[in-house]
Amino acid sequence: MRKILLTGGMGYIGSHAAVSLIEKGYKVVIFDNLSNSKLETLDAIKKITGVRPEFVKGDINSSSNLDEVFKNHRIEIVIHFAGLKAVGESMEKPLEYFQTNLTGTINLLNLMKVHDIKRIVFSSSATVYGKPKYLPLDEIHTTCPENPYGESKLYAENIIKRYAETDPEFSSVILRYFNPVGAHGSGLIGENPIDTPNNLMPYVVKVVYGEFEHLNIFGNDYPTFDGTGVRDYIHIQDLVEGHELALDLCFKEKGFHVFNLGTGKGSSVMDVVKTCEKISKKKVDLVFSSRRFGDVAETYATALKAEKLLHWKATRDLNDMCESALNYGKNLYE
């Protein structure tokens, strides 16, 4: 049984990946500082899978924390989820983003080298592309991030690339996510940040179920079909299936590989709101305000490279995404 380390594995994406990987037969070790997640997630993972993954509380910035994990566990491969991830917050706290997302990645690679671990899948972001020069975005599009979050992800990618070039036995897969949303079909895990959500879907869910009075929409004057920002939303379950296939590639091929994970279709903020209203049969009150600095009007992917080389393709639509997120919300609030 292959043993895999998930840094940041208690978070939204990491916890869904943990469930999927356990069900695929991996032995999962989760490393997380619980800064934006809850220990109860382990109980939910066990309820879904019948297995409680091993958990180590620690900080990705701490070399000693990471070293203990590698000393105590025979890790074969790492999925590196850990990091700060909010575009808006990164504009206010750039140093924290560079410290966590870059120092953490360097610490991880150093310890992987010490313990002779030669496979990594890295959780990157479509924000590395910046303002699109053309759509859909492919992996050869220029990278010019508009915010410190995107910059930190791109720098981390480059660090991994440079390191991979020094070791012909090293295998690395970079996954550039577009906008993960939705929840596990059980309704037991989903996106529920400790603080006020920075992402659209959990905010909409909290408005639907009455925790918040209204949804703040940043910008309704973008050059898009309804004036609100357009993004490529991808169901969390499609996303984790991409990770499973990325792991397979890591075990088969060496080198440095980059893939977009998206649906290839853009949906606006209002598309998401209207879909959630239709499913929940509840009105979402809206307050419009000015655009956030660092946001782009429209972005969506082509994932043809992932389809060709990973044999992966997103299969779930916006209705599936909203329905699963609302189902998770129902379990939280009702």
Image (cartoon, helix red, strand yellow):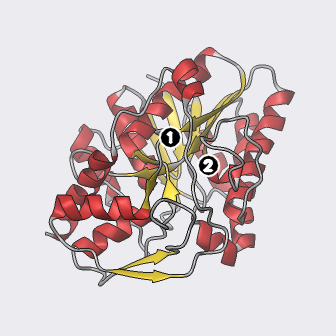
User: Is residue 236 depicted above or below 77 in this figure?
Assistant: below
Q: Residues within 10 Å of mark 1 (few under 14, many from 20)?
A: many
Asked if one can make out residue 39 in the rendered structure from this viewpoint, the answer is: no
Name the residue nearer the viewer: 300 or 185: 300
Image quadrant holding the C terminus, namely bottom left
Residue at (26, 38) in percent of width and height: 49
Residue at (52, 51) in percent of width and height: 31
Name the residue nearer the viewer: 215 or 121: 215
Numbered label tally:
2
Where in the figure is residue 145, as x and y percent of width and height? 73, 57
Cβ atoms at labels 1 and 2 below 8 Å apart: yes
Name the residue nearer the viewer: 250 or 271: 271
Q: Name the mark on residue 262.
A: 1
Image quadrant holding the N terminus, namely top left
Q: CA distance from mark 1 to mark 2?
A: 9 Å
- In primary-sequence order, the first of circles 1 and 2 is 2
Indicate the amino acid at tag 1: Gly
Residue at (40, 37) in percent of width and height: 238
Where in the figure is residue 283, as x and y percent of width and height? 21, 74
Where in the figure is residue 111, as x and y percent of width and height? 72, 42
User: Is residue 27 depicted above or below 235 in this figure?
Assistant: above
User: Is residue 54 depicted above or below 170 in this figure?
Assistant: below
Where in the figure is residue 275, as x and y percent of width and height? 27, 58
Q: Residue furthest right?
A: 166
Asked if one can make out residue 85 in the rendered structure from this viewpoint, the answer is: yes
User: Is residue 30 depicted above or below 209 in this figure?
Assistant: above
Indicate the amino acid at tag 2: Ala
Q: Name the mark on residue 185.
A: none
Label 1 SS: loop
Residue for badge 2: 126
